[in-house]
Structures are given as structure tokens and as C-alpha cells.
């Protein structure tokens, strides 16, 4: 099969031919990859900010695939595979419904070969039916941008006025879910990114501006998706008493120091890590009810490196998806 492989930090992804096609072990499914979403985490992996212990590795953790190996596959011809690829089921986190923090967790496209290939093997416990009505490419961004975005939204509790810093794949999905829940969404983009601001307004935000601006009202919660630690401080400065700032990414530049008065009055800063199966089940049920519509730019497998650089440079709105 053809696969785009990470070989080391500072080296470009390389197309390789692998033989034979990977074989599923007990409890695993063999998938023909139909689409695989690109995520900012892939850039952190590429840049070494999130280390890959055992290269070479096939990246890609938003896999939509057809099940090839399972006789039951007539019932679930199409499944999605997210970032969380395996958990131990035994540690204190797994035993307390916090498998996202499992001490021995393995992640798709980091510890397990991912979806930037023609075929992939996945633990069937972490394969989720894709809701009907979503074409393959449109479904892929639901699996990380959607799921982890949804988990971040859950951490915002009942916040009515919600700020989103960084208006990419996750924010464009979350805006639709949050508006449907009756929240007011405030979108913060890079300075001068009028395309992303216009896109945000199209999706129903009540205000869009750049991250140095103050919104017209104090926010009850903010989610920071952009990997820029200074945004945590900015978000605190526009947060109402009792509000929360949720850091939604796996890596961020250092957070600058800030006066205690920005945190005083029960403001909270927290991160969100990975996902649980419950997040996946809940969000994949919610998405078609909203309905969440994703905007995607599709790239062939051999253009995966270009898709990643377009993501870095902010050259598209919405999400990028590899279609092998
Ligand atoms: Zn991701
Ligand atoms: Zn565990």
C-alpha cells in the first residue's frame, strides 16, 4: 500500500510503498481508508513539539474507513478512528471514566500507524460508526476537531458567552454546536484574517475580530485552540468573574506571567486532553442533529505535506482532509 511516513523531526513526510497490507490482530479491524483529516497536532508531531518515540510512523488520526476484515461489517460498513487508539483499562484513570488520561494510552498517528495511507488497522473498541448523511471527507474532521472541541465545550459548563481563539477546524465545528445550544459565540482570529472572520459570521457568531481586540461584552468562557500561550492571558482579560479559559491544544508556547487580578474572582484556567469513548459517542450522535456541516479542502495522499504547510500558513478556512 502507499503511505505517507514521518521519519524524523525536520524531515519531510515521505511517500513509501509498504508490503503487505497491515494485518489486523485479535480485536482489531482492517480498514480501507476513505478519508483522513489533518490536525494541528500533526504539525506538532512533525516539528517534534510532541515526540514520536518510534519512527517511522504513518500520521493521521481522523480516519474514516470501510471495514474489510469483520464479518459483521455489513452492519457498520463505515467507521471513524480518533486520536485515542488504545487504553489499558486497568489504571486508576481508566477505572474512573477518565481513560483520556490513561497512563499507558496509545495514540493513533503517534504510537500506532494512522490514516495517511491506503489501509489502516485499528482497535475495534476505538472505531465508531460514522453518522449517515456525511460524505467521507466531511466526516473526517468530526473525529478530532469535533470530538476534542466538544470535550472542551463541555468544560465550559453552561457558559452563555463563549469566545473561541483560533478559528480553524475545531472552532468552525464547535460554533455550530454552541449556537444550536443557544450560546453566543465570539470568534478571535489572527490579525487581518478577514476570510476567517467572514467565515465565522457566516456560521452564526455574534462577533468576530482579532485576538488583540476586546469583545463588546465580557465572556463567560473561552477556548484557546491556537497554540499561542499569550492568548491565555488575553482571554483571561476579557473573562467575567467565575469564567473559565480552556486550552484545547496538545502543545502551546509558554504562557506569559500575568497579574493575579486577572485570575482573581474564581476564574479558572485549565486544559483538555484527548478524548474518551463517551465523548465520541455523544458528539457523533449530536453532530447530525445540529446538523454540523464541515467545510473541507481535500488533498490527495501524495500532497499530505502540502496540506500540513497550508494549515500552518492558514491558507484555507475550515479543515483539510487527505483522500487517498
Ligand atoms: Zn487532532
Ligand atoms: Zn489506563
Image (cartoon, rainbow, N blue to C red):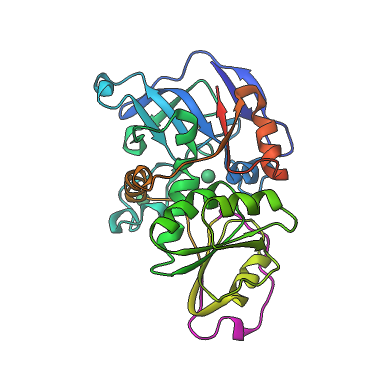
- Residue 22 appears in view: yes
Q: Residue at x 38, y 48 (%)?
A: 290
| Magenta region, residue range | 249-269
Side of 191 relative to 240 (left or right): right
Residue at left 44%, top 66%? 156
| Left or right of 275, for residue 199 | right
Q: Give the quarter of the image for residue 155.
A: bottom left
Closest to the observer, 282 or 119? 282
Residue 138 image position (x, y, % from top left)? 48, 34
x, y percentage for residue 148?
46, 51
| Image quarter of residue 251 | bottom right
Give the vertical position of 140 relative to 74 (above or below).
below
Which is more toward the observer, 193 or 34?
A: 193
Q: Tell me if residue 81 comes above or below residue 154 in the rendering.
A: above
Tell me if residue 255 is in the magenta stretch: yes
Q: Is residue 14 above or below residue 123?
A: above
The answer to which of 159 and 194 lies nearer the viewer is 194
Please check the rendered image and state whether residue 67 is part of the magenta-colored stretch, yes or no: no
The vertical placement of 232 against 169, above or below, is below
Please identify the dominant SS of the magenta region: loop
Residue at (65%, 83%) from the top-left corner?
259
Task: Give percent across and percent down for residue 204.
Answer: 51, 55
* Image quadrant in which you'd find residue 207: bottom right
Q: Residue furthest top?
A: 20
Amino acid at each position: 500500500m502507499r503511505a505517507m511516513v514521518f521519519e524524523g523531526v525536520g524531515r519531510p513526510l515521505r511517500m513509501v510503498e509498504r508490503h503487505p497490507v497491515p494485518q489486523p490482530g485479535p480485536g482489531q479491524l482492517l480498514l480501507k481508508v476513505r478519508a483522513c483529516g489533518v490536525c494541528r497536532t500533526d504539525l506538532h508531531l512533525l516539528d517534534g513539539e510532541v515526540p514520536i518515540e518510534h519512527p517511522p510512523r504513518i500520521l493521521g488520526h481522523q480516519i474514516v474507513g470501510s471495514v474489510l476484515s469483520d464479518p459483521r461489517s455489513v452492519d457498520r460498513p463505515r467507521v471513524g478512528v480518533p486520536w485515542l487508539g488504545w487504553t489499558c483499562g486497568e489504571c486508576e484513570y481508566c477505572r474512573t471514566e477518565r481513560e483520556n488520561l490513561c497512563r499507558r494510552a496509545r495514540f493513533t498517528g503517534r504510537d500506532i500507524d494512522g490514516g495517511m495511507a491506503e489501509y489502516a488497522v485499528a482497535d475495534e473498541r476505538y472505531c465508531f460508526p460514522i453518522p449517515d448523511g456525511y460524505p467521507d471527507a466531511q466526516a473526517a474532521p468530526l473525529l478530532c476537531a469535533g470530538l476534542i472541541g466538544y470535550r472542551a465545550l463541555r468544560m465550559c459548563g453552561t457558559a452563555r458567552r463563549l469566545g473561541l481563539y483560533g478559528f480553524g477546524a475545531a472552532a468552525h465545528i464547535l460554533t455550530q454546536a454552541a449556537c444550536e445550544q443557544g450560546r453566543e459565540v465570539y470568534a478571535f482570529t489572527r490579525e487581518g484574517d478577514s476570510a476567517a472572520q467572514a467565515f465565522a459570521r457566516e456560521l452564526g457568531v455574534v462577533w468576530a475580530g482579532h485576538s488583540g481586540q476586546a469583545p463588546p461584552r465580557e465572556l463567560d468562557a473561552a477556548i484557546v485552540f491556537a497554540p499561542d500561550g499569550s492568548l491565555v492571558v488575553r482571554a483571561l482579560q476579557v473573562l467575567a468573574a467565575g469564567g473559565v479559559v480552556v486550552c484545547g491544544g496538545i502543545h502551546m508556547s509558554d504562557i506569559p506571567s500575568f497579574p493575579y487580578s486577572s485570575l482573581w474572582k474564581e476564574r479558572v484556567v485549565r486544559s483538555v486532553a484527548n478524548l474518551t469513548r463517551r465523548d465520541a459517542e455523544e458528539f457523533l450522535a449530536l453532530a447530525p442533529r445540529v446538523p454540523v456541516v464541515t467545510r473541507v479542502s481535500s488533498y490527495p495522499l501524495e500532497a499530505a505535506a502540502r496540506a500540513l504547510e497550508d494549515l500552518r500558513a492558514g491558507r484555507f478556512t475550515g479543515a483539510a482532509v487527505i483522500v487517498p
